[in-house]
Image: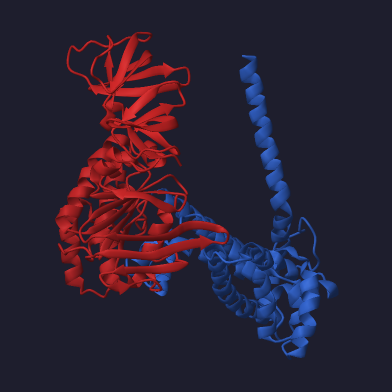
Amino acid sequence: MSGQGARIEYVDISKRYGQVEALRRTSLTIEAGEFFSIIGPSGSGKTTLLGVTAGYVPPTTGQIIIDGRNVVGEPPFQRNIGMVFQNYALFPHMTVAQNIGFPLRMRKTPRAEVAERVRKMLALVRLEEMAERKPGQLSGGQQQRIALARAAVYDPLMLLMDEPLSALDKNLREAMQDEVKQFQTVLGSTVLYVTHDQAEAAAMSDRIAIMNHGRIVQIGSPRDLYEHPVARFVASFLGEANIFDIDKVSPHASGSAIATRHGFSLVSAIASGHEGQCICVRPEAVMLHAQRPTGHDNVIEGRIVDATYTAGSLRYRVELASDVVITQRTPSVRGAEMFAEGDRVFASWRAEDTLLVADD
Amino acid sequence: MTWNTSGRLARIFLVVFTVAVLIYLIMPTFVIVPMSFSSKSYLSFPPPGWSLQWYQTMMERHDYPQAFWNSIKIGVPVALLSTTLGTLAALGVVRGRFFGSRPMSAVVIAPLMLPQIILAIGLYPIMAKFGLAGSYPGVVIGHTVICIPLVFITVAASLKNYHPAYEYAAMTLGANWWQTFWHVTFPMIRVGVIVGGILAFTFSFDELIIALFLTSPETRTLPRLLWEDLRQYVTPIIASATTLVLCISFILFGAVALLQRHLSKATRS
């Protein structure tokens, strides 16, 4: 059952609907066995890329090379790719066992082997006792697991997943993330996972591509993208970001000195800063002090406008200037003192945490 | 208290009104039934006495059984032909995303909206030219023109009822076009297809105007024979034949109602 997933190479792939460029020329390689996610807002081209891969959307240009074979032009049923749909698309008129056996029957697999492989997949997703039920009698999470089993039972070259967890409630969604990840590890499949939920993608993926307006803006590991975003869109789409607009950049002993448009100046460790960028500071990088700290790279006085406590962490909104409110987050230690709304505070962060990104 | 009283009055009014509308809808149809059991040789309501003689007379005449079989010989191929073509048209227009699929659906439905007399007048010279006027194929083609939209409407409704992701899923799982249709699409639209087929048969079985233009004395249908008989002698035999048509229509409509209940139960589970 466990095979190695395939390596997928997209070469200059694009899709145009009339005047609309749903997907601009994109080249991308997904390694064998990789869990690769695509995130982006709706209309960013991620669903188009999925449809082009599955084969029900013909691309305008380009090639998709799966294990050395160009599959563009092949109908979906010849590609040997497994797909999990947003609402599972389990056939309502077939039992769970018939659903999982469907791809094997289409391949003229002998009856005894179909039964054996269906049994093994049901065991893998721990739903043996549901074999004779109809999908409508199963819970959302169970249907999700059956959809996974059906998409993987025939050892496909890769698994495509289109927002497979979006229909589940929050707690179940988090449990299913582990389940999907474990399923992929056991089978060793290459996974292309599409979602608009950045936290979900970060929790599961080896690498993530962020898409916007039909093109990939940045590719990297979840940590890479969070710590080194290249553009304002990436910085604010993945996690929270405090963004400052730049007025003027000049050289500085430890990198760049930046005059912001908000009336204060900041220091960044990045030496090659220039106008046309903006500054991104992550909420975790910011420290708050009651007294003006000494020896810190960036210190700005402000006022707490909102203080919230959420399961294990403190989250403050701090007004630094009349038009700038930043977010600050720290894990809460038991008994730690909290600032109150209206307190005067000093916000500080290191030059290394003053990121310069393209202002798109 | 007053609220309760006015609520009860409103409910009584609603029941009375509903019953009145139902009687208005069904009454004319049922007047014919007692007349068919009349003991006299003229049509009158209520009949002066009761007898089964007109049913016997109808069976003894050779033209009524022949017209009945003609209606079936025309209705069954009409149902099969229009079910096939109407289903294909619905699949193409609803699932295909090609330029002009919306205007095309208006064209498919048009024969149902046009006055039948216009269709009949238009069809007659064409059939005459091909030597089909008065033949079985002629009237079958004529009825199929109107029955395709009937099937199209019921099948298109079933197709719009579910997301095409089921078909995409089947194809990624390895089912080719035909297997996808047979294992996934058809089971999901089956009830719509059957209901469309029954409506098509019922329409053809009851239809008069096209039959007047396109059948001959050899191929004439039951409605045409009734029409011709009415113009010569008004005997209760007409009521007997009409009652027979009515029974068949009711059985078929009952089947449609049962199927639709089955469908809504299946989609709910």
Rendered image quadrant of residue A226 = top left
Q: Is residue A138 depicted above or below B245 in this figure?
A: above
Considering depth in this image, is A198 or A286 the residue closer to the camera? A286
Provide residue A339's location: percent of width, then percent of height. Answer: 30, 11
Provide residue A243's location: percent of width, then percent of height. Answer: 40, 31
Residue at (37%, 16%) from the top-left corner? A306
Rendered image quadrant of residue A51 = bottom left
Counting the numbered discs, the total is: 0
Q: Is residue B182 depicted above or below A265 in this figure?
A: below
What quarter of the picture does the N terminus of chain A occupy? Answer: bottom left
| B149 left or right, relative to A91 | right
Considering depth in this image, is A192 or A132 the residue closer to the camera? A192
Provide residue B73's location: percent of width, then percent of height. Answer: 61, 80
Considering depth in this image, is B224 or B90 the residue closer to the camera? B90
Provide residue A42's location: percent of width, then percent of height. Answer: 45, 46
| A138 left or right, relative to B4 | left
* Residue A234 visible within the image: yes
Rendered hue of chain A is red
Indicate how the structure is coloured in the image.
by chain
Q: Return the residue found at the far right.
A: B232
| B168 left or right, relative to A223 | right
Residue at (24%, 57%) from the top-left corner? A149
* Residue B266 visible within the image: no
Considering depth in this image, is A243 or A143 the residue closer to the camera? A243
